[in-house]
Amino acid sequence: MHKLIPVIAISTLALAGCSAPAQDDGLIHIVASTSVWGDIASQVAGDRASITSFIDGPDVDPHSFEASARDQLAISDADLIIENGGGYDPFMDSLVSAAGTEATVLNAFDASELPGPNEHVWYSFTGTAKVVAAIVDELSTIDPGNATDYAANGDTLTGAIEDLETRANNLATEGDVAVTEPVPVYLLQSVGLTNATPEDFTEAIEEGNDVPPLAMQETLALFIDRKVRLLAYNSQTASPETERVRTAAEDAGVPVVEFTETLPAGADYVSWMSGNLDAVATATARGL
């Protein structure tokens, strides 16, 4: 589970009781912790919403995100706040608490109804479709006059997500894989692959701790013995230890597939996930 430590300037906290009123621009103001949920909300809301995403680029390390005074103001002005939840973005709870806002807070992890403990909801097509439905419901409550449009947009997006799930299921591959973090595990499972990485390794990487020597040894052995079909590498949070694992995979001829936690530049959710499925299909086609 990620631990993103909220760092909010003293001046930010002072804004909690004296923030400027939201602009009367006729739009629904939506604030999302990451660009993933911001993009999905935008597709549901269309041009009736203004979207602010705090973590909005693949070059940003979500683990070290620091909230700013501008972020606090965005929360204060929001009509709908979308957090990932599941321990991924606790800075959102701090911002909401400091703002004293009455805006609806949608927790994507809860809405996904996934059993956990993997909080990377957006890599589960089933879970993401349920979040889309929750966003439709919230927008329809905030703006009932346009509920029909929100429902139609949600249906369109859900259909595209279901197509992704069908495609994943049709890949129908199997075997073990290694991951530097469990970020894409839901997607890997959807194509029939099983994460064989020692839990002590991925937990240490997620928490920013040193990997126990035995866990590192067992992880490296997955490549030396060619027990895995690919390495799923989180390029957004690289470290010397994950680079060591990547080198071991490359030396052993095991394909490395890069994943990110937020949208690549110019991509939307569906095109991003489609590209991820392409990469997995290419890697697994190489065989062992």
Image (cartoon, grey):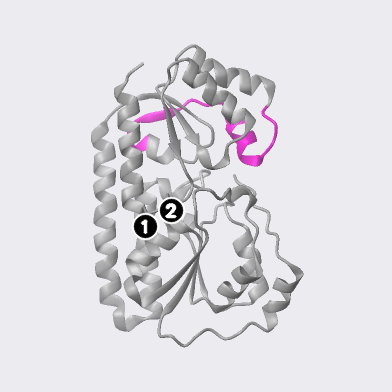
Q: Position of residue 140 (x, y in %)?
A: 35, 76
Report if residue 53 lies within the magenta region.
no
Up/down of 99 relative to 182, above or below? below
In which image quadrant can residue 221 be found? top right
* Total number of numbered discs in the rendering: 2
Q: Between tags 2 and 1, which lies in front?
A: 1
Up/down of 272 relative to 143, above or below? above
Q: Quadrant of the N terminus?
A: top right
Q: Position of residue 10 (x, y in %)?
A: 76, 70
Mark 2 highlights which residue? 113
Residue at 28% over, 44% down:
165
Residue at 42% over, 54% down:
112
* C-alpha span from label 2 to label 1: 8 Å
Q: Residue furthest right?
A: 10
Up/down of 14 relative to 21, above or below? above
The residue under label 1 is which amino acid type?
Lys
Q: Provide the residue span drawn in magenta.
A: 189-211
Mark 1 highlights which residue? 130
Q: Is residue 116 left or right of residue 148?
A: right
- Secondary structure type for disc 1: helix
Report if residue 190 lies within the magenta region.
yes
Label of residue 65 in the image: none
Say whether disc 2 or disc 1 marks the residue closer to the N-terminus. 2
Q: Position of residue 141 (x, y in %)?
A: 39, 78
2 and 1 marks in contact (CB < 8 Å): yes
